[in-house]
Image: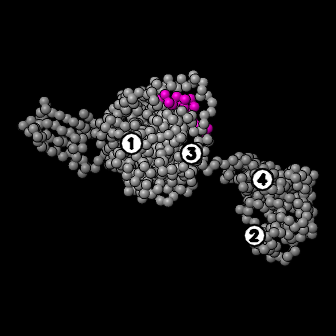
Amino acid sequence: MVGGRGKMPTARRLLLWGNLSASLSPAPRGVYHIGTNRTRGHRSAHRDDQWDTNGEEPRRKTGEKPSGMPSGRHKTSLDVVTRKRLSRIGRSPSRRALNERGTSRKRHVRQTNALPSEVREAPEGDRRANQSMPNTHERPPVNEQLQPSVPSRFTENNNKTCGRTPEGDLFSIDSLRHGSRELKSPRGPLLLPPQSYSRSRHLRVKMKNGRGGWNVRASALARNTFNPIRSIVENLRLAPHPDKPMIALSIGDPTIFGNLKPPQEAVEAVCASVQSMKYNGYAPSVGYPEAREAVAKYCSTPTSVVDAKDVILCSGCSHALDLCISVLGNPGKNILVPRPGFSIYRTLAEGLGLKVKSYDLLPEQGWEADLEQMESQLDADTVAIIVNNPSNPCGSVFSKEHLLKILDIARRNYVPIIADEIYDHFVFPGREFYSLGSLSEDVPILTCGGLTKRFLVPGWRMGWIVVHDKTGVFDQEIRKGLNCLSQRIIGSNTLVQGALPSILSNTPTEFFKETLSAIQGNAEIAYEILDRVPGLSPIMPEGAMYMMVGIDMEKFPEFKTDLEFVEQMVTEESVFCLPGKCFDYPNYVRIVLTVPEAQMREACERIEDFCSRHFQVFEEEEMDMMDIITYEEDDGRKIREHNALFEEKIFLTADGNVNEEDCLINKVHLMSDEGRRP
């Protein structure tokens, strides 16, 4: 703009170049704090004669020049380069940029510190980044006569100031903090290296669209995403015993030890899919119709028939959970998750800005949900309840009656449910799996499942979402939202999609029985050994691949937390279990049941040895446990029960001596100064 009383272009829109030339000879080397008094459009906001004098200069009259400023109309000397630079953005140097008229457009300069010849960027907050550069000149004393007053409205947080050098050239920066070598900009600080300034050089700061240099920030989603398990495990000080091979009871991958293999039918189906050459291209983002139809048939029950349109194929069950939480949650809302529970629920929710609330699973009730607490946590901002059945990490399986009570709570409060059923049908004999979707009549449910666990192929990344919504609650927005979100990764693995119908229909039931038999066998071994260990309380699982073991930390006073307990057990026995803190449930550890049987037994025996060395009781408790009780069985045989803690039972003869023939010792664990002996 040329002349006139128009609005002054801001620093973000106008590219200005400052030229500090040799005319600055009276002043010592320095950096100049540039500021703008005001614009014509804000006369009422700040008067011309309001100045912060700090007791050095009284309030001046309108039209009177401040000390340290040239008198009269001061013409600037924009060089040819500056004019060319301004013309590149389609503007000519305005008359207001070339002249300073009266008191309406005064610029004021304050000299603060040594003026360098270069400007470089440093990370935000790194005030010491320039210490590594050689300082060849001492900072000269400040010339007090060349420090004019600064308007009081100019503060360190004013990010849109601009002004002139003493010779009149326009100098556009965001701000320059007094007493430091830092130029503050919306994109972060710029540090000035402590190099000597030669008056023959020019300091030119280019500020275009508010950018003064490289300052690339992560998104809010990335900053808020946090994996508790990864964070806890990486901070553990794990140093396995050099003479004992490591046994990791922490990895939830059923294929890691090689003893559990996927069904041969699934492998052949994938090979056929590859050789058919039909599935090398892009599929619809929600999946091929024939693959979705196969999942619908697999998930249908007599009380809940699923159609292909209700199925969305995903890249694993974790991706399915991501889509479900994303389609329902908005920043500031909250979601209800189980405790103890799989940490990915919190990771996904908090990344989206959701607040995570928890409802407890009760170990004394077989890890059933605390229904009263669950309902008390619900409010108007609750977007969903996450129900994990069968459970990771607990290995519990909810009964039909318990699931119906959860549905009643959701119905009364009008809250949808996200059902994590990746371990569907992965239950031990004697228990039955019920899908929440098959029991619901009016509660909308998003069920997440996949091939990962039951078919032992976590690396194939095939999961799905099944929409159970008999009343059409999800028809208005949620179904469309899921379709849109699925387009972010353009669908799941097409080769596995091509094999999916054959995998789901041709895998024999014998395969599932053998897998469950191996997992249940390991569960029984672990429970039998750990249940007799003082200070430990294992809870027998009913399905899935895990067992939770309680730790009475008072009996292990050497360790303050379950983290220290786990660390020391790795150091002494080379056995690693995930601490309960990973699942928001301290004083527990989770063990994985997918290891080979021999390693399962050895690992549990090492845990037993570790606990026997560190287990301690108070003297009065020890006296109570060492009481000797003599009583008679129904058949008339006398039994001396010595040390009730270890359930030692020794059958006696009529004269009180040990009956060698009828002696039955269920569990003998005598503690002595030398340690444990059978």
Q: Residue at x 58, y 23 (%)?
A: 276
Pointer 4 local density, CA inside 10 Å: few below 14, some 14–19, many at least 20: few
**Between 275 and 352, the one nearer to me in the picture:** 275
Q: How crowded is mark 2: few (under 14 residues within 10 Å), some or many (20 or more)?
A: few
Q: As displayed, is residue 355 above or below residue 630? A: below
Disc nearest the viewer among 4 and 1:
1
Across and down, in percent, residue 110 comes to: 80, 63
How many marks on residues?
4
| N-term mark: 4 or 2 | 2
Q: Residue at x 18, y 46 (%)?
A: 627
Disc nearer the start of the sequence (3/1): 1
Locate the C terminus by quadrant. top left
> How far apart are labels 4 and 2 at the CA level?
27 Å
User: What kind of residue is marked 1?
Assistant: Tyr
Q: Main secondary structure of the magenta part?
A: helix
Compare marks 4 and 3 and give the one earlier in the sequence: 4
Check whether the beta carbons of the residues at disc 4 and disc 2 lie within 8 A of each other: no
Return the residue at label 1.
434
Residue sticking out furthest to the left: 655
Residue 94 coordinates in the image, percent (x, y): 90, 60
* Frontmost residue, 7 versus 25: 7
Residue type at the position of mark 4: Asn
The residue singled out by tag 3 in the image is: 482
* Location of residue 654 (image quadrant): top left
Of badges 4 and 2, nearer the viewer stands 4
Q: What element carries label 3?
A: helix
In the picture, residue 261 is in which quadrant? top left
Q: What number is the disc on residue 209?
A: 4
User: Going by the image, does 90 lie left or right of 549?
Assistant: right
